């Protein structure tokens, strides 16, 4: 009989292994010596040790699935439980039990990781749906359309959720995209209709602008062109292939008219500039009449100057107030001189002025006598009252005397 710490071979060739539950039969050995039998089954044990070691390494360093790992553990455990090897089988069971714990721990970690990834994916998809539903109401057609396409690419890169949740979110996402596409299609259909209407309106405006281009009725035609431009802007844009051509025709017609008007106005401006020089010379000559001396000769000279003034014609509008103001100033001076002369030589007015002055002087003299009498009598109250009245009459007398002086009196 042969034995070692973990097994023995009896006289019948039966091989045993020692375990915590007692000896277990490993097998029968008849082909060689007991030592060879033990060595053979010890090698089988070493094979199990190597196999367990490799499995431990795979579980630790690779992404071996929990299912495959458990299957490998079960396979090795069957061999250990079959007691077909000689060695510390209990130690192998302990290692296998620890390996099961590791696999279960990895399984739970992966489960939690998948749950976390699923939760993150759910939140990400819900955020995509919310943004898509907001974009569905946008009128920024190009930017919103590009963003929706980017959201689709982002969606495709996210993991799927459970079928029900994923389908519900996708339905909302797809509905938002469809709603946006429907609104955009309706918008551009409406825009096309508006542009066609704008094209017809601008065709009409171009026709009228071209018909007016040869007009010489400068003021009304220029005003009408301004109205046509306002109508053009209000019409909106036509289709791109028509807009530029219509504008070139419209602008070209205006350019023809305004170029002709500018040519005529340039000649007119030159003539009016010359007229301005002539009128400035006349204004300067008229100003030499001031101050008025001989009214009769000054009036005759101004009348002659005014006749020459009227014969000259128009001057530039912005210069008109200043040059005409100079002539009007001389004319007002003549009028004031005439009024002064009339007052001085009018006998009726002089007589009225002298009569008024005499009346006021008599009233002042009378009041002074009454005041002196009241003071003499000691009636100071009456004297004070009469003095107030005297002050008013003296003021009127002073004004009357100034007026009389205008008559040379």
Image (cartoon, helix red, strand yellow):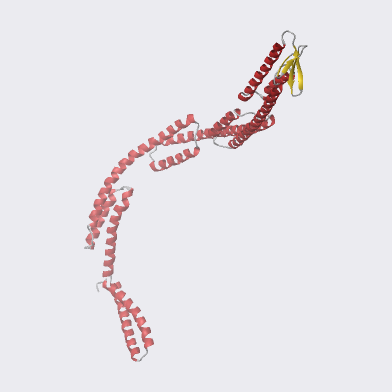
- Relative to residue 43, is residue 372 depicted above or below? below
| Residue 399 point in image, percent of width and height | 31, 74
| Residue 382 point in image, percent of width and height | 38, 87
Does residue 179 appear in the picture of this structure? no
Does residue 364 appear in the picture of this structure? yes
- Relative to residue 306, is residue 80 depicted above or below? above
- Relative to residue 407, is residue 296 depicted above or below? above
Pick the front one: 82 or 107: 82
- Relative to residue 306, is residue 384 depicted above or below? below
Pick the front one: 78 or 293: 78
Residue at the spot x=49%, y=39% of the render?
A: 234
Is 119 left, or right, of 8 in this rendering? left
Residue at the spot x=68%, y=27% of the render?
A: 98
In the current view of this chain or complex, which residue is farthest to the bottom?
A: 377
Quadrant of image for the N terminus? top right
Pick the front one: 8 or 276: 8
């Amino acid at each position: 009989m042969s034995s070692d710490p973990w097994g023995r071979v009896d006289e019948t060739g039966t091989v045993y292994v020692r375990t915590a539950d007692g000896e277990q039969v490993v097998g029968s050995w008849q082909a060689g010596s007991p030592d060879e039998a033990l060595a053979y089954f010890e090698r089988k044990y070493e094979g199990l040790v190597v196999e367990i070691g490799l499995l431990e390494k795979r579980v630790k360093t690779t992404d071996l699935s929990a299912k495959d790992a458990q299957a490998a553990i079960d396979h090795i455990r069957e061999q250990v439980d079959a007691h077909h090897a000689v060695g510390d089988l209990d130690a192998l069971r302990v290692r296998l039990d620890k390996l099961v714990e590791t696999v279960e721990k990895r399984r739970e970690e992966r489960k939690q990781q998948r749950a976390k990834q699923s939760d993150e994916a759910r939140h990400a998809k819900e955020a995509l749906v919310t943004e898509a539903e907001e974009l569905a109401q946008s009128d920024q057609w190009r930017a919103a359309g590009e963003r929706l396409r980017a959201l689709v690419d982002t969606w495709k890169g996210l993991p799927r959720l459970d079928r029900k949740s994923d389908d519900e979110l996708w339905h909302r996402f797809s509905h938002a995209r469809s709603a946006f596409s429907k609104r955009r299609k309706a918008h551009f259909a409406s825009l096309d209709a508006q542009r066609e209407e704008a094209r017809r309106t601008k065709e009409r405006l171009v026709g009228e602008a071209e018909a007016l281009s040869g007009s010489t009725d400068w003021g009304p035609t220029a005003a009408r062109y301004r109205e046509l431009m306002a109508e053009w802007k209000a019409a909106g844009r036509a289709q791109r292939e028509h807009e530029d051509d219509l504008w070139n025709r419209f602008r070209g017609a205006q350019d023809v008219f305004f170029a002709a008007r500018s040519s005529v106005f340039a000649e007119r401006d030159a003539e009016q500039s010359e007229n301005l020089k002539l009128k400035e010379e006349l204004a300067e000559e008229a100003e030499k009449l001031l101050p008025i001396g001989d009214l009769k000769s000054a009036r005759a000279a101004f009348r002659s100057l005014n006749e020459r003034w009227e014969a000259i014609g128009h001057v530039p509008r912005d210069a008109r107030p200043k040059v005409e103001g100079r002539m009007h100033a001389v004319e007002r001076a003549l009028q004031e001189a005439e009024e002064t002369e009339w007052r001085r030589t009018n006998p009726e007015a002089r007589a009225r002025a002298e009569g008024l002055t005499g009346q006021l002087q008599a009233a002042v003299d009378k009041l002074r006598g009454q005041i002196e009498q009241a003071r003499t009598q000691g009636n100071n109250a009456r004297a004070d009252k009469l003095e107030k009245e005297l002050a008013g009459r003296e003021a009127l007398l002073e004004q009357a005397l100034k007026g009389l002086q205008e008559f040379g009196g």
